[in-house]
Image (cartoon, helix red, strand yellow):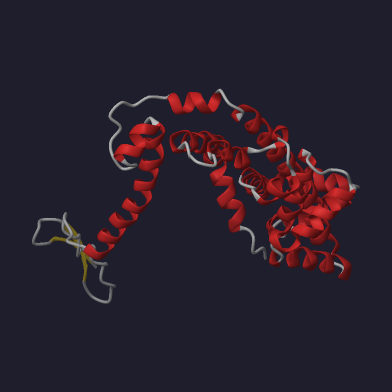
Amino acid sequence: MTQTTTDQAGRPTLATSGHGHAAPKAPRRRGRFSWHRVNYAAGAGAFLWLVIVVVPLYILVASTVQSRADYLDKGPISLPSDPNLDSYQNVLEGDFPRYLLNTVIVTVACAAIAVVLSVMVAYSVVRTRSRLSRGIFQAFLLGLAIPAQAVIIPVFWIITKLQLYDTLLAIILPTAAFSLPVSVLILVGTMRDIEEELYESMALDGASPARMLLQLAVPMSRAGISTVAVFSALTAWNGFLFPLILTQSPENRVLTLGLYDFVGEFRVDIPSLLAAVVLSMLPIFTAYLFARRQLINGLMGVGGR
């Protein structure tokens, strides 16, 4: 038999008599405030890390709004007494726009080549599952262990024999090639997560491998493709070795080499140099802000199944 009673706080509860089962007790509520032990060591470490990150950024931005004389007299940490944008004007009136255009061309071309080739290679590795495809995949993984510095002489010889020296193609082709191992690894892990039943259903409908690639594999691998595009773009944008070795004329310089324009034999225009660094950082940083979620999602699927 069940009876309704009240507890000490006046709340109604259910009680049973005889062979009935006792009603569950209401869970006890915790106090409104709960005391946690303060981790001072973690707070001090976080503050120290914040200082380490913020101080260089402050020096970078503050130095660009100072004149060269004020920078040399007061130092990089001092507050700007007379802020101005003369350093940015000096950079934009020089060859910086041409360097920026060359860098954009190289970045877009490298990202496009890496995406197209890695998609086809990854699809072949995932769908073929033969000894040849596994060997190709292992060969791409071997490329992860080969740094560009170790093969710069053979690359220089090949570019020279192809008569591509001192052209933008001389930068694009090696940069895209060294982006392929990581790109293939990312897309293989992404495409392995696609259910086999989806491929089988399209095959029963008479779909060709090319159609399954374009209508199934590519749409369901958008996160991995975005990751490959962002990674390849970052690699090309920050590339220094290939532009330094494989180009010579000012017409084919990219931003990483254009910074040398502000470094002379007997002087260094530090405010203008740092202004060029800030301007060269803004485009790729903006692209990263819009694609950071796809980049993280794509990297999370590298392991595959």
Indicate left or right for 130 with 109 as reference: right
- Give the number of marks: 0
Q: Is residue 279 above or below residue 257?
A: above
Residue in the image at 25% along x and 60% along y: 44
Which residue is more in the foreground, 17 or 236?
A: 236
Query: Most extreme residue toward the front, as rendered?
Result: 266
Residue in the image at 9% along x and 58% along y: 9
Query: Most extreme residue toward the left, as rendered?
Result: 8
Indicate left or right for 120 with 71 as reference: right
Residue in the image at 74% along x and 49% along y: 176
Residue 198: give x, y in percent of width and height.
77, 53
Q: Is residue 16 above or below residue 206?
A: below
Which residue is more in the foreground, 232 or 195?
A: 232
Which residue is more in the foreground, 166 or 197?
A: 166
Res 303 quadrant in image: bottom right
Indicate left or right for 141 with 39 as reference: right
| Residue 264 can be seen, yes or no | yes
Indicate left or right for 229 with 199 as reference: left
Residue 275: give x, y in percent of width and height.
47, 34
Tell me the quadrant of the picture where the C terminus can be found.
Answer: bottom right
Q: Is residue 58 above or below residue 141?
A: above
Tell me the quadrant of the picture where the N terminus can be found.
Answer: bottom left
Residue 289: give x, y in percent of width and height.
52, 40
Residue in the image at 18% along x and 59% along y: 34
Res 39 quadrant in image: bottom left
